[in-house]
Image (spheres, helix red, strand yellow):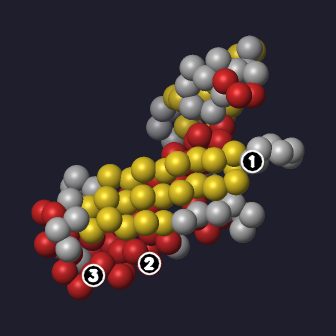
């Protein structure tokens, strides 16, 4: 169990503190939903959670097999619904692995793709959210 403490500061801003580490992040409502867009929105954090989860579980798998994924990039493009109710419609994920990483991975590509597709955040999302994943293995 992990405790997260959230304080509403007014004007659609929140301050969240991670219990175990005391790390703090702030949120703001997005421009298209009455906010200033001055920081991550709550739904941006869902997209961020997905991207960092994908990178983390791929990193765990790589570490287990004795190689690094340094230089890997994950881009998550969040799309909201255009009609009510407001919700995330799609989180499109593109994972780019540079040639130096691709050469070291060898036959583990499919395993890395599978752990990414089954990361805990992805498995926690509703089926109503499309989550296409594209793997760009540079230097194939």
Quadrant for the N terminus, please. Answer: bottom right
Q: Mark 2 and mark 1 in contact (Cβ < 8 Å)?
A: no
Residue 2 visible (yes or no): yes
User: Disc 1 marks which residue?
Assistant: 81
Marks 3 and 1 sit apart, C-alpha to C-alpha, by: 36 Å
Disc 1 residue crowd, few under 14, some 14–19, many 20+, Cα 10 Å = few
Q: Comparing marks 1 and 2, which lies closer to the viewer?
A: 1
Tell me which corner region of the image, top left, top right, bottom left or bottom right, holds residue 84.
Answer: top right
Q: Residue at x 48, y 66 (%)?
A: 133
| Element class at badge 1 | loop
* Image point (75%, 47%), residue name: 81
- In the rendered image, residue 9, in percent from the top left (x then y), is placed at 71, 16
Identity of the residue furthest to the bottom in this view: 107
Q: Residue at x 52, y 73 (%)?
A: 118
Of callouts 1 and 2, the N-terminal one:
1
Mark 2 — residue? 114
Q: Name the residue at 72% across, 68% down.
A: 127
Figure quadrant of the C terminus = bottom left
Q: Which mark is residue 108?
A: 3
Question: Observer-nearest residue: 123 or 36?
Answer: 36
């Amino acid at each position: 169990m992990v405790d997260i403490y959230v304080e509403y500061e007014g004007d659609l801003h929140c301050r969240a503190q991670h219990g175990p580490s005391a790390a703090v992040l702030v949120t703001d409502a997005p421009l298209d939903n009455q906010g200033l867009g001055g920081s991550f929105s709550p739904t941006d954090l869902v997209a961020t959670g997905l991207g960092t989860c994908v990178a983390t579980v791929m990193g765990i798998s790589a570490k287990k097999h004795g190689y690094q994924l340094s230089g890997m990039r994950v881009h998550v493009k969040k799309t909201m619904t255009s009609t009510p109710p407001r919700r995330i419609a799609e989180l499109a994920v593109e994972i780019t692995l540079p040639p130096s990483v691709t050469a070291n991975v060898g036959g583990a590509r499919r395993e890395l793709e599978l752990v990414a597709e089954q990361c805990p955040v992805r498995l926690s999302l509703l089926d109503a959210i499309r989550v296409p994943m594209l793997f760009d293995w540079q230097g194939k």
